Image: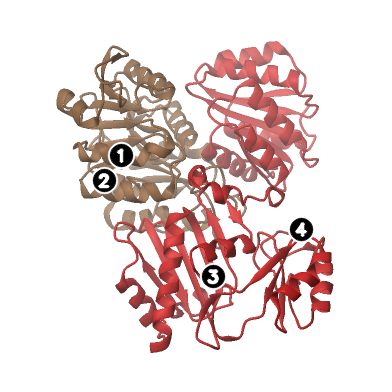
Chain colours: A brown, B red
């Protein structure tokens, strides 16, 4: 079991023939992901990585029955690509591209919701179901099967967390990089119940960061709806106010969005919050041991 | 990206939003002509820096003669202005804006900002103009009216009415206020703004609504399609090291500690700072070298970190994924040939091929390179090395 994607998921790639699209698509294929084709307008009919290229998402969906799209198009074209995917009936759109204008994402996400399409990202490493399906840019080798679901705003912290969990002899069901932008698709609130419902997931790791209030919202949700243990780390405890820390959304504005307030909110609802990211793996192990 | 008040007001004018007339000068020799060209018998001289709280720091002065305009300009130009938003070092004033005086009947607050939870712009208004809005929100939250505007329908009449009734405006005030808010929303959307704050928005004695101050920030990701905004960028307002880093695709923020950090990925970079704090040290910076972490970017990273005299050790924390650790290890060795690094460098490489990477670093036998097995070990060693407790 897993959430959202598995070994049977059919995936197309928008921005398939570009440098990033080509490199990461071939990495995904190597991992075992069922990539069934790609879209590059103007290159329809060609073959790339031994797979068909289509001019439009609708053409690709008609011939391949793909349900998921992975997006690598340049920032200025992300909204267009997302809305095209939604229009074509794609069910889940994974947006890897970094630097999409915030205004565009407001419109694109609203349209995706209207069409019933889920989105992940933008500016994210993607989603991976361990040893089955990787849709994104994460190093596949570190993700081994196990009982832990992972939700993270950061790419490299996802790898760090997953690696620690695997090194403790545990592993991952599905890991989702939700992205570090001000406007993102699926977030903690939507993903937590999916992990709650997934039988193989025994614990959930949440990696958050400064900025916005998604973690606070998640804390309220955990209190009401989540029975599985949640382990959390919030990055940016030592970040100064008003400074953007790499991610477009990682900024403490005034007194809101601080790591301290997020950690407090999570602790209050029984989440196991670690102060140091080096303790994620150890904490997961001890929490799971206590439950047995 | 932020712009100056005088630039924000130019932009307001382009959108037919009323502002006082004003002239920006860089030399006090122009002050008298500026005052005379504006006319009237009252002027406001305002220091142009990218920070709020200028009034309290002596960066805003109301004067009554052209002679006083000159004196105020002389005093402000070149001065280092310290406000609660500039940090203790303050900012040097290079431009002042001389404005005509305005007959103020009433002051309001009006802003447009992204509501991240609702995922759409929200207009924030208050009758408590001229105050710090965070303080108003804390003390009297009922005096703040928030109206979210769905971009798919834009600013409608009901949005305007919700603001006007919320603020309990008089009948005469309603139409001009709503018109002002509507235009401000248009500007926000058309220019890809991140924040527009008019504080105060004043009603003049003759009933006109006019932007007395203006603060604007724009979405960096959209600057590529906003050339006029990009042209307003004032590089002197930015930290030179952060600017240099960005030219090489590195994301750098200087902090006050003594352990330099070089990390791949923004989240891990923040996590590394947090770990250094956790083990009792203080990070000197945030530095994300990006996914590639090649010899050139690592060398540039070393160069930027070493410019900070407080740095006593460097912690290189790379999680090798797609880019294998052995290649990164070679990159670090190459980088140390390109830049002279004479303080301890603690290197933690984890992920793909980390064992080979450790061997490469060990075989290179460079005395100031110390390897670490994991994140916490690396942080501890870097802090100890900085304190001279590690050989």
Q: Residue A47, can we see it?
A: yes
What residue is pinned by disc 3?
B198
Q: Chain of mark 4?
A: B
Q: Give the alpha-carbon distance from disc 3 to disc 1, as whole Å.
A: 34 Å
Specify few, some or many for label 4: CA neighbours under 10 Å numbering under 14, 14-19, or 20 or more.
Answer: some
Judge whether B164 appears above or below A180 on screen: below
Circle 3 SS class: strand
Q: Where in the figure is residue B302, as x and y percent of width and height?
A: 71, 30
Q: Nearer the viewer, mark 4 or mark 2?
A: 4
What residue is pinned by disc 2?
A112
> Do callouts 2 and 3 mark residues in contact (Cβ within 8 Å)?
no
Going from the N terminus, do you reach mark 3 or mark 4 first?
4
> Do callouts 2 and 1 mark residues in contact (Cβ within 8 Å)?
yes
Q: Give the alpha-carbon distance from disc 1 to disc 4, as whole Å.
A: 44 Å
Q: Are marks 4 and 2 on the same chain?
A: no
Q: Chain of mark 3?
A: B
Which numbered disc covers residue B355? none
Q: Residue at x 40, y 69 (%)?
A: B182
Which quadrant of the figure contains the C terminus of chain B?
top right
Circle 4 SS class: loop
What residue is pinned by disc 4?
B94
Q: Chain of mark 1?
A: A
Q: Are marks 1 and 4 on the same chain?
A: no
Question: Taking A55 as reference, is B22 left or right?
Answer: right
Which numbered disc covers residue A82? 1
* Camera-nearest residue between A26 and B107: B107
Q: Give the alpha-carbon distance from disc 4 to disc 2, as whole Å.
A: 47 Å
Q: Give the alpha-carbon distance from disc 2 to disc 1, as whole Å.
A: 7 Å
Q: Nearer the viewer, mark 2 or mark 3?
A: 3
Q: Where in the figure is residue A268, as x and y percent of width and height?
A: 42, 59
């Amino acid at each position: 079991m897993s959430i959202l994607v598995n070994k049977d998921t059919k995936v197309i790639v928008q921005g398939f023939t570009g440098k990033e699209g080509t490199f990461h698509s071939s990495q995904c294929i190597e991992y075992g992901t069922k990539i069934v084709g790609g879209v590059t307008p103007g290159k329809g009919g060609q073959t790339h990585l031994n797979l068909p290229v289509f001019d439009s998402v609708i053409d690709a969906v008609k011939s391949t029955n793909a349900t998921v799209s992975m997006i690598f198009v340049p920032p200025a074209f992300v909204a267009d690509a997302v809305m095209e995917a939604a229009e074509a009936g794609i069910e889940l759109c994974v947006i890897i591209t970094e630097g999409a204008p915030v205004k565009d994402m407001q419109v694109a996400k609203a349209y995706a919701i209207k069409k019933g399409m889920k989105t992940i990202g933008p500016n994210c490493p993607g989603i991976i179901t361990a040893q089955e399906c990787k849709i994104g840019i994460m190093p596949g080798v570190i993700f081994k099967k196990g009982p832990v679901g992972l939700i993270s705003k950061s790419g490299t912290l996802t790898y760090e967390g997953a690696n620690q969990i695997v090194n403790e002899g545990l592993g991952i069901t599905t890991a989702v990089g939700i992205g570090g932008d001000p406007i993102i698709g699926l977030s903690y609130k939507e993903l937590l119940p999916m992990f709650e419902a997934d039988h193989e997931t025994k614990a959930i790791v949440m990696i958050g960061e400064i900025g916005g209030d998604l973690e606070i919202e998640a804390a309220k949700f955990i209190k009401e709806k989540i029975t599985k243990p949640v382990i959390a780390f919030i990055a940016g405890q030592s970040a100064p106010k008003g400074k953007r820390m790499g991610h477009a959304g990682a900024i403490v504005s005034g007194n809101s969005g601080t790591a301290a307030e997020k950690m407090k909110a999570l602790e209050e609802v029984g989440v196991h919050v670690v102060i140091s990211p080096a303790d994620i793996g150890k904490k997961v192990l001890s929490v799971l041991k206590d439950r047995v | 990206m932020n712009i100056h008040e005088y630039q924000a007001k130019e932009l307001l004018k382009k959108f037919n939003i009323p502002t006082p007339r004003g002239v920006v000068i860089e030399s006090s020799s122009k002050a008298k002509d500026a005052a005379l060209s504006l006319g009237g018998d009252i002027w406001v001289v305002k220091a142009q820096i990218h920070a709020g709280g200028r009034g309290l720091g002596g960066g805003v002065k109301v004067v009554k003669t052209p002679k006083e305009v000159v004196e105020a300009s002389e005093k402000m130009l070149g001065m280092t202005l310290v406000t609660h938003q500039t940090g203790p070092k303050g900012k040097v004033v290079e431009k002042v804006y001389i404005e005509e005086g305005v007959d103020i009947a009433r002051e309001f607050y009006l802003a447009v900002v992204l509501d991240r939870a609702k995922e759409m712009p929200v207009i924030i208004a208050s009758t408590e103009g001229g105050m710090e809005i965070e303080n108003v929100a804390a003390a009297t939250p009922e005096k703040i009216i928030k109206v979210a505007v769905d971009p798919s329908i834009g600013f409608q009449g009901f949005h305007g009415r919700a603001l006007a009734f919320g603020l309990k405006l008089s009948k005469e005030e309603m139409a001009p206020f709503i018109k002002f808010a509507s235009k401000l929303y248009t500007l926000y959307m058309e220019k890809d703004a991140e924040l527009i704050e008019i504080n105060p928005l004043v009603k003049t004695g003759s009933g006109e609504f006019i932007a007395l101050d203006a603060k604007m920030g724009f979405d960096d990701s959209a600057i590529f399609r906003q050339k006029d905004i990009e042209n307003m960028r004032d590089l002197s307002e930015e930290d030179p090291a952060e600017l240099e880093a960005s030219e090489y695709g590195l994301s750098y923020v200087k902090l006050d500690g003594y352990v330099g950090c070089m990390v791949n990925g923004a989240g891990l970079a923040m996590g590394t700072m947090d770990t250094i704090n956790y083990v009792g040290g203080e990070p000197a910076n945030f530095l994300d070298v990006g996914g590639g972490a090649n010899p050139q970017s690592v060398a540039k990273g070393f160069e930027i970190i070493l410019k900070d005299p407080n740095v006593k050790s460097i912690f290189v924390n790379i999680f090798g994924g797609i880019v294998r650790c052995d290649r990164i290890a070679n990159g670090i060795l190459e980088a140390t040939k390109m830049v002279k690094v004479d303080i301890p460098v603690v290197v933690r490489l984890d992920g793909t091929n980390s064992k080979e990477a450790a061997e490469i670093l060990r075989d290179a036998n460079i005395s100031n390179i110390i390897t670490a097995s994991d994140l916490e070990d690396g942080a501890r060693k870097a802090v100890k090395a900085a304190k001279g407790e590690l050989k």
